[in-house]
Image (spheres, helix red, strand yellow):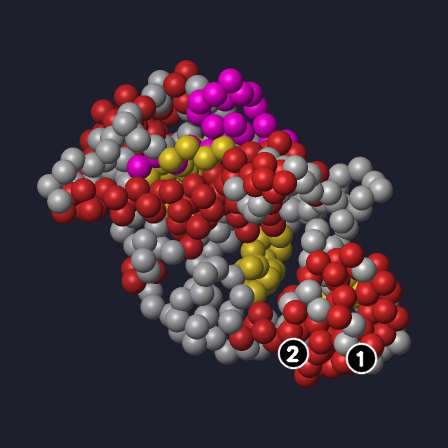
Amino acid sequence: MSFVAHTPHRPHASTDALPLAGIRVIELGNFIAAPTAGRMLADFGAEVIKIERPRTGDELRNWRLFAGDTSMLYRTINRNKKSIELDLRTDEGRAAVLELVSCSDVLIENFRPGTLDKWGLTPEALTAANPELVVARISAFGQTGPLAPRPGFAAVAEAFGGMRELVGESDRPPSRVGVSIGDSIAGLYAAFGAVMLLLDRGNRKKQGRRPWTPVERHVDVALHEAVFSMMESLVPDYSAHGVLRERTGGRMQGIAPSNAYVCSGGDSVVIAGNGDSIFGRYMEAIGRPDLRDDPDLATNDGRWARRDELDRAIEAWTSQHPRDEVLAALATAGVPAGPIYTAKDIVDDEQFAVRNMVQTLPVDVAGEIRDVAFPGIVPVLDQQSIPVSSPGPDLGEHTHEVLSELLARPCSCRACLDAMAELGDDAVQDAARTDATDRRARSART
């Protein structure tokens, strides 16, 4: 049974009541890192205007594209945003960006360092347009240092930051997790940094101090450093003890027993029975009181030394029982365990449904509108995930709204082109500027 379509969801407050309501964000760049940061801010109420290159847009639109012209990967990472088309290589495109900056709070970008400078969007230009702008920059190796000019994707960052060396089996080459984890971590840091500087900006104003300008301070996130920050005691263990961590497959080095085990039906479970008090209950549950009472296994060091023996004993038990029986017995014993889920398992799971963590939205899939399941918003507020308002937009879907209505600029949408053909460019621009005066006054940041 799928819970997604049938679970009633408690209504949430409107978008205006979300924590970041009233914050406007300009998102520049492609792929996953900067868009993840923008998604985080959009999820909690910020108005995020995503600027995409004309005609092709963000390359993510074509990644894992199974049908149509926009992938579900793009729809997921760019949810709750607006999309406009601007060519940043043109004077007109750069002028529009600076005008947007003048009435926005945050700019997020993930170009190679120096790219925006070449286009005239320097820190000085951003400061002139909006001295209180918060700028979050994401790049492969950061804005400084000998490697700063180099390009790089998450795959490189995960290797450079120490993660790739630890993923996989010890007798095989390093592997990779199945998602762009380096990009996602960097995006989280950029979103956190942006909110941190927004808070600092407000506090400085309250204290009568001038906020930082984009020239003086910005958020600088390097992909490899974001990965490195997650590596726990990798470097301290080497520095203090000369220990170099090794790949251990489904295990975590120095922690036992904790691994994945096959059940009788072929399904697998993950069981983390490595706590000292948990271990005794664990061995009792699998019918091995001899291991429970063995003094050499009373602490983690002893269990790690005999990890192969323990894993054989555990899988001898799991292999004799269906997954549900294994999980029920371990739950009764108070041993942390869980199934290894596929996408179908997640969609059908009651726990995800109760917290509104899988949400269905209507999406154009190759010309057909379908209800598509998407991940909910994390973290949860008020007991359930906030409803996702919209999937990632079509390319340029909001160009008219932003350029014509917010900035009073002519745009190239069909309606504007038809109007210009009838009235002439000057008349259209004058009318648009008059109509937009009130909107811009309300939108301008003081």
Question: Which residue is at a point 39% across and 71% down the rendered structure image?
Answer: 382
Image spot of residue 207 (x, y percent)? 13, 44
What residue sits right under mark 1 in the picture?
A: 289
Image spot of residue 317 (x, y percent)? 85, 74
First in residue order: circle 1 vs circle 2: 1
Q: Is residue 210 left or right of residue 86?
A: left
**Which label was assigned to residue 334?**
2
Q: Report which quarter residue 414 is drawn in.
A: top left
Q: Distance between the residues labelled 1 and 2?
A: 16 Å
Q: Can residue 398 be seen in this view?
A: no
Q: Report which quarter residue 19 is drawn in.
A: bottom left
Image spot of residue 237 (x, y percent)? 61, 42
Bounds of the magenta span?
Answer: 134-156
Location of the N terminus (image quadrant): bottom right
Residue 293, compared with residue 27, is above or below; it is below
**Which label was assigned to residue 306?**
none
Question: Which residue is at a point 31% across and 37% down the rendered structure image?
Answer: 134
Image spot of residue 234 (x, y percent)? 61, 42
Q: Which amino acid does label 2 sit on?
A: Gly
Residue 383, compared with residue 210, is above or below; it is below
Whether 106 is among the magenta residues is: no
